[in-house]
Amino acid sequence: MRLRIAAHRSQTLLHRSNRIRSVRTESCCCDDWGAMPHEIASAITESEAMKIRQTDPSSPEAVTILEQSWRFLDAMFPPDQRFRLDMDSLRASNITFFMATEGGMATGCAAFAQQGDDWGELKSMFVASAARGSGAAKGLLDAVELCAREKGCTTLRLESGTGLDVAHRFYEREGFHTIGPFGAYPDVPSSVFMEKNLAPDSGDGDATSR
């Protein structure tokens, strides 16, 4: 999964171009798409608030942003080195899907995949080029980390790709470090594997992944 991300933690205001922006993040990590999410961050913006919410990946808005991410990855990596989730995989029972919107438009997405009792994976992370730097990436990552913790995970891992250096630096700032291949991933030249400790006493802080 390749992802780019950025937004603010609860009660944190981002300053961009001397203007105050804010991000509302709504997430409950629920199994029912219709369940009411709880708000973990909220503030006033100069226009419509950006929102991060759990949603159905097959909804029209989610499909639009997912197709953008798939085109991006398909243009960068050969078929045998693309590890993105297709729609059937995104609707599996171990997946929780999040979408960023602003002004009613989808601007990014990310998914949490529960892979074991105490660890999970960041998948399908993507932010549209026009929204990069808006806070969507951080908001999506925060939502995934909150979901992982709520499900009892102490480790979050991801697989990204070579050439996505900006994303990798973002992950490093957020507490990820490089590791070797994990799970069923092959050791291919284009893959970059990273991990973050989510344990309360880990000291870690809270892009594009496949």
Image (cartoon, grey):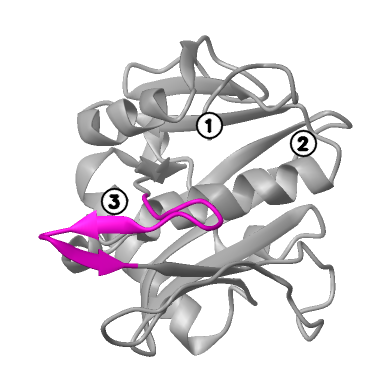
- The picture places residue 107, in percent across and down from the top left corner, at 34, 71
The C terminus, quarter of image: top left
- The picture places residue 25, in percent across and down from the top left corner, at 56, 67
Residue 210 visible within the image:
no
On screen, residue 177 above or below 166:
above
Mark nearer the N terminus (2 vs 1): 2
Which residue does the image show at 32% across and 24% down from the upper left? 190
Residue at which label 1 appears: 158
Q: Please name the predominant secondary structure of the magenta segment in the image.
A: loop
**Amino acid tagged 3:** Asp
As drawn, is 47 to the left or to the right of 22? left
- The picture places residue 11, in percent across and down from the top left corner, at 52, 58
On screen, residue 160 above or below 146:
above
Between 183 and 176, the one lying in front of the other is 176
Between 19 and 205, the one lying in front of the other is 19
Q: CA distance from mark 2 to mark 3?
A: 25 Å
Pointer 1: residues within 10 angstroms few (<14), some, or many (20+)? many
**Highlighted range, magenta:** 6-21
Residue 53 painted magenta: no
Q: Secondary structure at mark 3?
A: helix
**Amino acid tagged 2:** Gln
Of badges 2 and 3, the one in the foreground is 2
Q: Residue furthest top?
A: 180
Residue at which label 3 appears: 74
Mark nearer the N terminus (2 vs 3): 3
Residue at which label 2 appears: 115
